[in-house]
Image (spheres, rainbow, N blue to C red):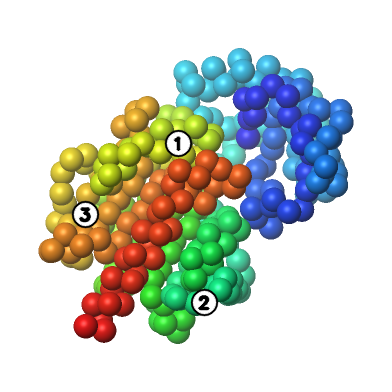
């Protein structure tokens, strides 16, 4: 990971804002590493946090020049070493590492056993959330809306989901190439066969796209950062979103696609480059059944423009429940 802001680390590290159980990047590149940490909640430095988790870092790099290089030539493999000082030998090691295309990394990041995040206040719904690399804030955002969230490993089966007796199913963000995640696609196909409402974020959006019959592809350079403009085609509103993805769904803009479960269409687009940022599935009456977005509506500490999507998920589950009771 390359930080484009020149001065990094002055906030330090605290144990209240973690979004995962560990740091997942293999290496971290910065220009100017702060010598002091000044945030009142900080209990250790960035350098200490990286060292404790065995993540190599490098400073005093012209990261803006490096970013311009990547923008022209696309994302690529890299090596950082404190052991190998011969550039030619280090290059050999870098070129011997696997490329991201075709990488199935879900098993490396998913939880080992199911966990339950209880609803805050009155429980309204139960959701089975498949952990493909889930961020901690996602079940919190659901719990705030009266949802009891059962976070399940990526290896879960449709029988595991049925045992939860969910009102809806969620597929999380995660790393790797969606074209290699066949097991997740198969599981989502079963979920759609069950008629359960579905909500997906980031990797979950790509898996949804594959389940609906669309392809995926690797972007020349991914969408990163908290300032990406996206239009919700349902409302025509523009959201400023947080994004972190290197793959995207190849689905036609402005065109309906018939599937075994209803009509699929692109619901959100990136205003920078028209990349697909969301999908939706509706029934014959035009009612929303399932949907997904490529960006991160749970973003902590923001932006919060897209928090309405969790309310939309609640509305879809409530509509299905009302239909069953009628």
| Viewer-side residue, 155 vs 42 | 42
Look at 83% across and 42% down and name the residue there.
40
Compute the Cα span from label 3 to label 2.
33 Å
Q: Residue at x 36, y 36 (%)?
A: 238
Which quadrant, please, contains the N terminus? top right
- Disc 1 crowd rating (10 Å Cα; few below 14, some 14-19, many 20+) is some
According to the picture, the residue beneath numbered tag 3 turns out to be: 264
In the structure shown, which secondary structural element does the residue marked by tag 3 occupy?
strand
Characterize the local packing of mark 3: few (<14), some (14-19) or many (20 or more) Cα atoms within 10 angstroms: many
Measured from the top left, where is residue 242 in percent x and y?
Answer: 50, 40
**In front of the other: label 3 or label 2?**
2
Which circle's residue, 3 or 2, is located before the other in the chain? Answer: 2
**Residue 57 shown left or right of residue 37 in the figure:** left
Image coordinates of residue 165 in percent, x first then y, are 42, 82
What residue would you read off at disc 1? Answer: 240
* Kind of element beneath mark 1: strand
Mark-to-mark CA distance, 1 and 3:
24 Å
Q: Using the image, determine if residue 270 lies above or below residue 88.
A: below
State if disc 2 and disc 3 touch (CB < 8 Å).
Answer: no
């Amino acid at each position: 990971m390359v930080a484009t802001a020149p001065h990094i680390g002055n906030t330090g590290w605290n144990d209240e804002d973690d979004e995962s159980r560990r740091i997942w990047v293999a290496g971290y590149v910065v220009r100017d590493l702060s010598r002091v940490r000044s945030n009142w909640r900080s209990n250790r430095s960035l350098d200490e946090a990286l060292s404790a988790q065995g993540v190599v870092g490098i400073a005093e790099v012209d990261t803006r020049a490096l970013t311009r290089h990547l923008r022209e030539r696309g994302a690529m493999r890299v090596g950082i070493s404190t052991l190998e000082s011969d550039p030619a030998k280090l290059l050999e090691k870098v070129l011997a590492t696997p490329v991201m295309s075709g990488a199935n990394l879900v098993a490396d990041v998913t939880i080992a056993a199911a966990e339950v995040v209880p609803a805050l206040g009155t429980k309204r719904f139960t959701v089975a959330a498949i952990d493909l690399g889930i961020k901690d804030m996602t079940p919190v955002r659901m719990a705030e809306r009266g949802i009891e969230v059962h976070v399940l490993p990526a290896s879960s089966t449709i029988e595991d989901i049925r045992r939860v007796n969910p009102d809806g199913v969620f597929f999380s963000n995660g790393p790797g190439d969606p074209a290699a995640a066949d097991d997740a696609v198969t599981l989502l196909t079963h979920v759609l066969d069950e008629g359960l409402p579905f909500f997906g974020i980031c990797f979950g959006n790509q898996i949804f796209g594959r389940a609906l019959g669309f392809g995926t592809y690797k972007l020349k350079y991914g969408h990163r950062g908290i300032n990406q403009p996206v239009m919700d085609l349902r409302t025509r509103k523009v959201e400023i979103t947080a994004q972190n993805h290197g793959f995207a769904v190849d689905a036609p803009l402005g065109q309906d696609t018939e599937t075994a479960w209803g009509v699929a269409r692109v619901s959100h687009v990136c205003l920078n480059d028209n990349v697909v940022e969301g999908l939706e599935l509706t029934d014959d009456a035009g009612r929303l059944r399932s949907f997904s977005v490529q960006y991160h509506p749970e973003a902590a500490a923001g932006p919060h423009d897209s928090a309405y999507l969790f309310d939309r998920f609640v509305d879809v589950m409530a509509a299905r429940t009302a239909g069953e009771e009628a």
